[in-house]
Amino acid sequence: MAKKEVIMPITTSKAIADYFIWLANETGSFLSNLKLQKLVYYAQAWYLALYDQSLFAEDFEAWVHGPVIPDLYQEYKKFGWKPIVKDVEEPKFADQVHEFLAELVAVYFSCDAFELEQMTHREDPWIQARGNIPQDAPSNAIISKEAMKEYYQERAEAEED
C-alpha cells in the first residue's frame, strides 16, 4: 500500500483570523465573529481548491449560521454580534499566501456577515455535512476538507470556462 504524503498546514486558523481582524482595523470595516468565521472558511476552502493543500489544520463544523471553528468562535463570542475589537499586528505569511488572501479579500471582504452566511448555506460542503438535520437545529458535524476542496475546485474550473 502506498503511503500518502502528509503536507503540514501552512499556518493556523488563528493567524488567518488575525489577518482579517488586522485588515478590518486598517480599513475601518465592521467585522463580527460571524463574518470572521465565514472569511476564514472561504480562505481554507479556496486554498484547498487552488493549491491542493490545507491553509491550516483546524476543522469547521456545520453550525446553524454556517461553517464555524469552535475554538475560534469561543475566542470571539464575547463580542456577540458587535465588531471584534482587538489590536493585532499584520501576520507574516509567505508571498503566495499574502497574494491569495488579497484576492480573497477582493471577492469576500465587502460582503456582510448575513450575505456570507447565506452563501455558505447554498453551497454543498455545509449542506452535505448537515445531512438531514433541520436548518435551525444545532450540529457539530465536521465539514470535510475533501468536500471543500472538491466543491471549490469545481467552481474554479467552471469560472475558467
Image (cartoon, rainbow, N blue to C red):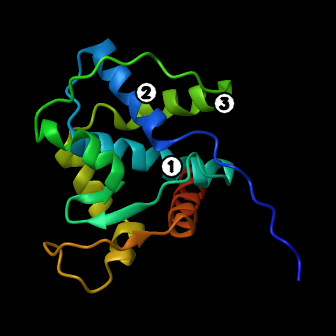
Residue 88 screen position, x and y as percent: 37, 19
Which of label 2 and label 3 is nearer to you?
2
- Residue under circle 1? 44
Q: Are marks 1 and 2 in contact (CB under 8 Å)?
A: no
Q: Nearer the viewer, residue 11 or 113?
A: 11
- Residue under circle 3? 96
- Residue under circle 2? 19
32 w.r.t. 123: above or below: above
* Of callouts 2 and 3, the N-terminal one: 2
In the orientation shown, which residue stands out farthest toward the bottom? 132
13 w.r.t. 156: above or below: above
When asked about the image quadrant of residue 139, the answer is: bottom left
Q: Amino acid at mark 1?
A: Gln
* Of callouts 1 and 2, the N-terminal one: 2
Q: Is residue 140 left or right of residue 16?
A: left
Q: Nearer the viewer, residue 53 or 120?
A: 53
